[in-house]
Amino acid sequence: MGDKREDAKSMECRRCGVCCTVHQAFVTGEDMERITAYLVINKDEWLREYDDPRWRYSQYRLIRHVNGACAFLRHEDGLAACSIQPVKPKCCQDWRPGPDRKECLEGRKKAAAGYGR
């Protein structure tokens, strides 16, 4: 049997999309190559459409927010969905929901209030 403290820290994603609104995903050069190939666009198109030009401080780039959320966030039947799910940035792949995460708590509150239905 697993450690109850460890089990309590993880949960299945409820697809509320809050994490995609409060955080900006950062992309590496490798992420950008995967995403541009998936979208069939070149680097200049990426920079024009998806890059946040305010971030110029490291080898990472930030995905711009559009209407208060990640440019790739979509909603389908009241659930958040990533339009580049198969190639989403590593930082998004590595993010884990949890009952103690403020983003998940906010998402649960919105769900209880009927948001997205």
Image: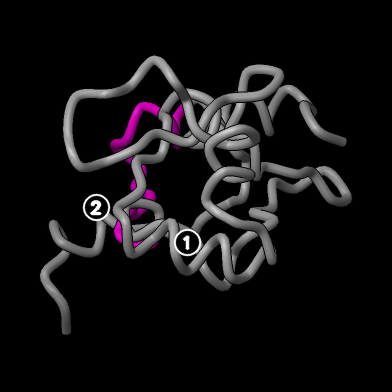
Q: Is residue 116 left or right of residue 14?
A: right
Magenta segment includes 101? yes
Start and end of the magenta stretch?
93-105
Who is closer to the viewer here, 43 or 103?
A: 43
> Quick check: 29 left or right of 115?
left
Expressed as whole percent of the image width and height from the top left, the position of residue 107 reads 56, 32
Label disc, if present, on residue 12 of the rendered structure: 1
Instruction: Report the side of 16 relative to 61 (left or right).
Output: right
Question: Where in the figure is residue 89, as x and y percent of width and height?
Answer: 41, 57
State left or right for residue 8 relative to residue 115: left
Q: Residue at x 69, y 53 (%)?
A: 81
Provide the secondary structure element on which disc 2 rests: loop
Name the residue at the bottom extreme. 1
Q: CA distance from mark 1 to mark 2?
A: 11 Å
* Residue drawn at x 17%, y 33% as measured from the top left: 58
Write down the residue under mark 2: 9
Quadrant in which residue 105 is drawn: top left
Whole-percent x, y for residue 80 in the image: 69, 46
Amino acid type, callout 2? Lys
